[in-house]
Image (tube, helix red, strand yellow):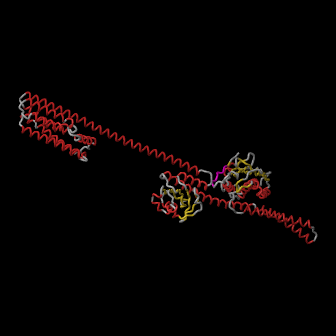
Amino acid sequence: MLPDPAPDPGAQCAGIQQVQRLYARIPLDVVVSLLIAPALVFSVWNAIPSSVLLIWLVLLEVSVVIRLTLIFIFQRCPHPEEDATRWAVRYVWACLASGVSWGGAVLLLIYSPSLIYDVLIVLVLGGILMSGLLTLTPVLKAYLAYALALSLPPILWLLWQNDPIHITLGVASLLYLLLAVGIAHHGYQTLNQSLRLTLRNKALIQSSLTAKEHAEQDHRQLAEQQIALMDSVEAMRELYRVISSSVRCAERMRAMLVMGCQRFGLATGILARIEGNCYEIVQVQSPSGEINPGDILDLGDTYCRDTLRAQGPLGFEHAAASVQRYHPCYQKSRLEAYLGVSVWVNGSLYGTLNFSDRQPRATPFTTVDRELIQLMAQWIGGALEQERMAAASQRQQALLAHASRLNTLGEMASGLVHEINQPITAIMLYTDAGLARLRNRSFEWDELRETLEKIAAQSARAGAIIQQIRHFARRSKPQYVPVHVNDLFDEISDFLNLEAQRHAVRIRYAASPALPLVLADALQIQQVILNLVRNAMDAMDARKGIFMILVSAHLDQGVVEISVQDNGPGLEPGVLSQLLYPFFTTKPQGLGLGLPISQSIVEAHGGRLWVTSNPGSGVTFHFTLPVAGNADLPESAPIALSIETG
């Protein structure tokens, strides 16, 4: 058994519209019935029995009243469209009753005394038949019930007569009925199609309006997304501008707080460290200056306790209009607007980054605002971790540099002993000579004074050598201060000259007194120079010829470049490319750490170290130092060491 076809929504809506049109106003045929029926009775009153006329008129008027009552009830019904089919059936029955009443006019034809009255009655019935076309065609069944019940009894009676005139009237009436039904059917079809087309147009219009509304909504969303995207791009630019700056980390953090205050429209920005219940301010941007770095607050008196509990950024624009008005922070500080997030360093909680204001914020915090503060907190966490690692690396570097200096002193031990032994031996000789003359009482005061002066000079010489050794061997924290390059050379010249004598090498210094001051830790830079000079001497050791080492300095594009040049045998290209790697060495007993340590020292000063082959023979090591007047020492980032050949 086939399932019933699904109802057509368009047909249902059209049917409802047809029923509503059927009941919309008092039908014309009802008005005609109220007026024509009494007039017809009055016209034939003398020709037809009055009892028949009155009975027919009462039945007709009752049917008319029934239709009027049904229309009145329909118009007062709150939702008649919900039961449109039943209302249509009711009206069909009412129309059938009205048609039967008019069809009862066949009684008038039966009692009619002449043809004139028959023609009058047929014409009246024809008029009544046509009057229903205007109001009953919305529901074709209603008109058919009305028209057939009205027309068929008189037509059949006329056709039943033997009189040609009556038969002609019957045929004409039948044709008139068929014409009326055809017109009604055509009107019904036209109205039905019109209603369906109207409903379809309404649906299309509604669909167009809905599509337009959706398009406008999509356009608004796209516009909002575009604005958010542009806002996000601008926020990323601001963040990149801050974090890509070459200033120190602390200054970048302060700049980030300033940027955050401007970006979020809040007056105060704070980076705080949290330990237990202590809230310590590390960095702050505040126009009032009432809070400063180093201030310690109780964590419970801040919004940051809630920030630590939140899964992401915590933000509110108007504390007085929310539950935050009961918070201790609001009770004490009256901070209305707040945006904060936790800061983590290497997986451990460090503290919070937060921005606040005593004035409410006019607009809500956006998704971009919350994402931006998270990125800021992540960068700060990474920067703090990098600072920790840099500090640890600096401590290790200082220990390694100190060990390297001690190793250098150990390698120079024999020369240093010889250097110290000379003044001690001289002191002993001068002392023995003076004591001998005192025993023999054969001295003169001038000779004794001269001997004592020589002893004092040799003692001073020995003390200076020992002091230099102690200075070079000491372990201290790097001190970056402005120094003269010539002073660096002078303080280490004794060591350099001592090594030069031991290796039979001539050493020369070339540095203009007009060179600007450099920003450096003197001891570490002297260690670099000593490492480079000793490497050059070791490369020229046990070889024949006159070997020279030139230690020079000159100004080059805002930095001072120091060079150690030798005329030794040079290095092979394969060796040259590996020379600066840790643990690579050409010395039988070397560790390969001297040059890497020198490289790290130079990079910590903000310079770079590189090596080039000389056009003739030998190599030259170069390194740069920043000028003290226009340089700022970088924090920790090492610069890749380069190797050049020429």
- Please provide percent x and percent y for residue 109: 8, 34
Q: Where on the picture, by quarter, is residue 429? A: bottom right
User: Which of the image's four quarters has the C terminus?
Assistant: top right
Q: Nearer the viewer, residue 602 or 569?
A: 602
**Taken as a whole, is the magenta stretch helix, strand or loop?**
loop
Q: Where on the picture, by quarter, is residue 412? A: bottom right
- Please provide percent x and percent y for residue 422: 82, 63
Magenta includes 197? no
- Please provide percent x and percent y for residue 90: 18, 44
Tell me the residue at 67%/60% (across/down). Answer: 398
Q: Nearer the viewer, residue 325 or 32?
A: 32
Q: Is residue 205 above or below residue 466?
A: above
Q: Where on the picture, by quarter, is residue 441? A: bottom right
Magenta includes 640? yes
**Residue furthest bottom as drawn:** 439
Q: Is residue 119 visible?
A: yes
- Please provide percent x and percent y for residue 390: 62, 58
**Residue furthest right as drawn:** 442
Give the side of residue 17 with respect to residue 231, left or right: left
Q: Report the magenta residues as a range.
A: 636-642
User: Which of the image's four quarters has the N terminus?
Assistant: top left
Give the side of residue 134 with respect to residue 308, left or right: left
Q: Is residue 447 above or below residue 586?
A: below
Q: Is residue 110 visible?
A: no
